[in-house]
Amino acid sequence: MKVLMLGWEFPPYISGGLGTACEGLVKGLAATDAEVTFVVPRLPEGAVSRYARLVDCGLPREDRAVALDAALLPYLTAEQYERLVARQSCSGDLGEDLFAEVERYARAVEQNVGADTAYDLVHGHDWMTYPAAIAVAENLGVPLVLHVHSSEYDRAGENANARIVEVEQRGLDAADRVVCVSRFAAQCLRERFPVKAAKLRVVHNGVAVPVSAGDDAASAPPDEPRAPRIAEPIVLFLGRVTAQKGPEYFLQAAALVVRHEPRVKFVMAGAGDLLPTMIERAAELGLARHVHFTGFLRGPDVDRIYDEAALYVLSSVSEPFGIAPLEALSRDVPVIVSRQSGVTEVLSNVTAVDFWDVTALARCIREVLARPELRDEMAAQGRAATRVLTWERQAALVRDVYRELGA
Amino acid sequence: MTSIVLYFHVHQPFRLRRYSFFDIAREEDYFDDDANAAIVQRVAERCYLPMNALLLRLAQRHGERFRCSMSITSTALEQMERWAPAALAGLVALARAGVVEFVAETSHHSLAFLANGDEFRAQVRAHTDRLERTFGARPRAFRNTELVIDDRVARVAGELGFCALLGEGADHLVGWRSPASVYAAAGTPDLKVLLRNYELSDDIAFRFSNRGWHEWPLSAEKFARFLERVPEDAQQIGLFMDYETAGEHQWEETGIFDFMERMPGAALQSGRFTFRTPSEVAARETAAETLEIPHPVSWADAERDLSAWLGNPMQSAAHAALYALYNDTRRAAAAGRPELLERWRRLSTSDHVYYMCTKGASDGEVHAHFSPYDSPHEAYVTFMNVLDDLARRVGAGA
């Protein structure tokens, strides 16, 4: 069977989990009978996949910075996007906005997807692709599957942008099946959108086990003597610094922890619209000597910070899935996760707290740091979950959804 | 006869490298020598060298009637020694020729007077000695960092034996009185306070090239007419500005050098004025009255207070964290690591917290102009990473 899959970004250039998830799904589907054609507004240089035909819609690149950033930053709010474009586009083309980009993508998909291939199904990822997916599925007369990695309410809470919500609602109305990345996400979706329960399916994301673990150890030069660079335990926040990720709760918990344990370091790794505010908050909360900010981290630095972390905290306000804790666990870093996240469904016995309960979060942080044996226990659990949660297995579940639609 | 006190400030901070969290406990090299060298060399080309030559010409032309004064931080001195020795040689020549009186300050352009009286005195003493070694005369006038004065600063300046203190003639300090009077500091009657005439100073320092200013273009003759408007009984007119005003803040193309070359001659024309140094004015004039300065006054921003350095939580936190390390740093220095104290002192340079300022509007533009960072937050994050490393090295832990 042939799947026309619409995405917004593809590794190596990604802004968050979406591109990674799409890559994993495509790879997993390759083990089934599904042949995937994956379309994006524009492909970054160096994007290759052995598992799918990648199609570049070739949206205009005249203003490289804007074009690139539009692809990189699908989770900007519309307002942030406008500011970004206003700042970068000196040509004065201020008609640009994220919605126009989404519309251009829809038109480009219609033009780029010829009748040369007989597709059995269209599968779109997140709201930026919905208009394109709806139109092309209708043109081709094939079933439509939409994949909700996050909804506007997850990303923006009560500040949800009405136009994005409208696009999402149209997608949910038009789709034959809606794939959610957790039961938690499906529940949130039903609370916010009138959507027929019969359409909803839950398929958790898979986890790509880091190749480094075994392989590198053999090839890498012998480690330097293992005195840690920083003696204090490091509690890590790693993710976009946006309202959705609850960075404020992380800092509030930090303030409670250092009252008792002044020798704990907190590291907030990542960039986002709330980063300046969080930096100021850390200073206000008396955390100047306790919290460090790294900005956005790339590959090797992500590995370094996981190597040094004693504990990973996912403080999200609403996290449809949340892959980062699994990545942390796969690197032997124990985790505490927000109860408002989908990842709790795939981790038995994980330490979970309500995102708003900073007292509980602070207590849990102190407990984990005080009991190093928890580290091994949690890491073992994480590895077990990761082993089960392969993209091959999860993609097979997506293939089952296609099958329900006769594809 | 009214004295014109033409005073220039010279300063260069040791700017930090992009010091990340991963550099902590690994990288001992905090300072961006490449950038610091490039900047001091650029400023030397554009400003220090041509201004040094210009001041020497003015002294030759006007003889005894032209004097000026200058302060230079030890961080700037060190950078000139290393990377722009000709600029320093020019300053030494000006001092030896008696054209320039060097004014004392804190060695590192710090805010120590706010946080630690011992360190404040230590920096002033160290700097006074250094100026005497370099320029051959012991400074007798004092200016605090960013021209910040209050009653405490005046008291310490008096205790340290200075005869004159330079300060900002801010409206809220001067009130109905004149910035052109010579004042005695409250509680330190022997110390004369000379205030900056901010209108006339900023006509040159800020407005000179502003085409939107109704007085633009400013010629030497026009400026001389402004000076004539100062009341007859004025004791001194304080024209205080950065040395970099010529060539760096106001580019050569604006005609600033031509202005500087001709202004003293135009001012001297009427015979009403003579250019004098702060200690000459202090010796000559009797204080008109006593000035009380309960709250710190600076020459920065519209507020003329400390808000440019300590106006937001990042700045306050960074400042407090720096001074919290002071005792440990002194101990480490006494135990054989004097370089750690020097590093601490370079971090005490007020520019580092100035870069963290989040003010908007036109003052914000001034801040951004001087900052090597993309944002105040980046400045703070970098500074705190460096401080964390220093804390480990002085044994203060986290």
Image (cartoon, helix red, strand yellow):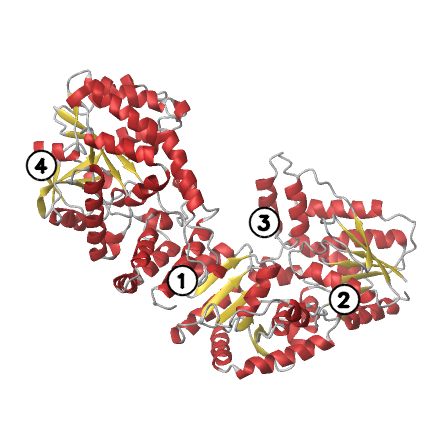
Give the vertical position of A327 relative to A80 (above or below): below
Residue B388 is tagged as: 1
Q: CA distance from mark 3 to mark 2?
A: 28 Å
Which residue in the structure is indicated by mark 2?
A179
Q: Nearer the viewer, mark 1 or mark 2?
A: 1
Which residue in the structure is indicated by mark 4?
B287
In the foreground, A50 or A357: A50
C-beta proximity under 8 Å, tags 3 and 4: no
Q: Amino acid at mark 3?
A: Gln
Could you tell me residue A318's position as x and y percent?
Answer: 61, 67
Q: CA distance from mark 4 to mark 2?
A: 84 Å
Q: Amino acid at mark 2?
A: Val
In the foreground, A308 or A131: A308
In the foreground, B302 or B93: B93
Helix, strand or loop for disc 2: strand
In the foreground, B329 or B121: B329
Could you tell me residue B303's position as x and y percent?
Answer: 31, 43
Q: Nearer the viewer, mark 1 or mark 4?
A: 1
Q: Chain of mark 1?
A: B
Q: Could you classify mark 3 by the number of other residues whose Cα lies within 10 Å: few (under 14), some (14-19), or many (20 or more)?
A: some
